[in-house]
Amino acid sequence: EKGGYEHFMLKEIFEQPNSIADSMRGRLDAANGTLTLGGIYEYSQALINARRIIVLACGTSWHSGLVAEYLFEEYCRIPVEVEYASEFRYRNPVIHEGDIVIAISQSGETADTLAAIELAKSKGAIILGIVNVVGSSISRVTHEGAYLHTGPEIGVASTKAFTGQLSVLTMIALSVAHKKGTITQTRYKELLVELARIPAKIKEVLDNNAVVEEIAERFKDAKNFIYLGRGYNFPVALEGALKLKEISYIHAEGYPAAEMKHGPIALIDEEMPVVFIATRDSSYDKVVSNIQEVKARKGVVIAVVTKGDALIPALADYIIEVPPCEEALMPLISVIPLQLLSYHIAVMRGCNVDQPRNLAKSVTVE
Ligand code: F6R
């Protein structure tokens, strides 16, 4: 059932052009400029009127929640708080009647997320679920929601569910922005067209697999990694670091690139690979300066860059190219090489990538 791939994780990484297309099927009609999210119907007005949104999730799903924060704030002008479910539930959080909670969970069984949802629900919040597993516990306690439609994810490290979550959250945010009038018709249509192009762009990134594999060979014995990104690529840095530690057991940290100088910069030396997610976007110039700061301290830089960029390839030691893309949609693409990098490193280190030690696919304990 691994479809000819050596591991489920690799199969699931390579499935992403299709799984993303599946998540959009019947929902996104770029040619006519429409988005239809049947699962969020009764509460769509509440979402448009929301004074704030609380996102509840854990792990990788929490990372997709962070991307959603950027999307909802930029396009819908709704303030968003992204909460670790385990922290939220134990701190007597402020929840108002009618608050909107977006709960994100691949398995739909995560104990902390489920308990946090129940707490918010008991205080009158409206719970929207972004879940992969149909009929799961979380899908049953939410008021409404949208399934990912990405198919079962078997590898313990989440890959296609993450991009599926991003796809669904992006469609919800754009649909709200459109109905609310916080995005122009032209921008809305442009973004829908760009969204429809994501599967083909992911395919292009997957064609770079051999480049990523060579980089993995060079760094497979590293003891530590840092991942840095800004804006929409900041959550991608966190996700890249999480993937690496989960399956290769190499210590890795993700940071917003500008935070580096407030501490992690002390770690940088000739041994330390620093992965920059440095695509062409509104923080590009700032990221270039951050790369220069690392190089000045003899750090080794691996950079994920936009195809055609000439400046960063001249600074970085290793580059991985991704196709040009709208800033808000870039996480769907820029995370792919990081998934591949952790996969190859883990395989080269002889790790069990589909069943990493100490981890379970559903975390049903608190
Ligand atoms: C990361 C990973 C975990 C899960 C987390 C939440 O690869 O698998 O961090 O993302 O346990 O799980 P769900 O999304 O099922 O609630």
Image (tube, helix red, strand yellow):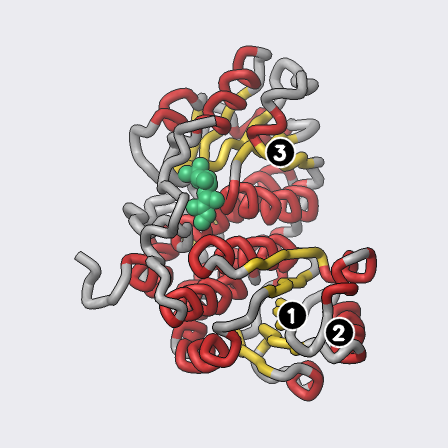
Q: Is 151 situated left or right of 252 in this image?
A: left
* Labels 1 and 2: the sequence-earlier one: 1
Q: Position of residue 255 (x, y in %)?
A: 68, 56
Residue found at the far right of this picture: 262
Q: Secondary structure at mark 2?
A: helix
* Labels 2 and 3: the sequence-earlier one: 3
Q: Distance from label 3 to label 1 (Cα)?
A: 27 Å
Q: Can you tell me whether the CB of the residue at mark 2 lies under 8 Å from the nearest atom of ligand 1?
A: no
The amino acid pointed to by label 2 is: Val
* Labels 3 and 1: the sequence-earlier one: 3
Using the image, determine if residue 80 lies above or below residue 71. Answer: above
Residue with the mark numbered 3: 83
Residue with the mark numbered 1: 274
Q: Which of the 4 quarters of the picture holds residue 269?
A: bottom right
Q: Residues within 10 Å of mark 1 (few under 14, many from 20)?
A: many
Which residue: 53% across, 35% down?
A: 57
Do residues under tags 1 and 2 come within 8 Å of each other at their CB atoms? yes
Q: Secondary structure at mark 1?
A: strand
Work out whether residue 85 or residue 274 is closer to the camera in this orientation and state it.
274
Using the image, determine if residue 301 lies above or below residue 128. Answer: below
Q: Which of the 4 quarters of the picture holds residue 107?
A: top left
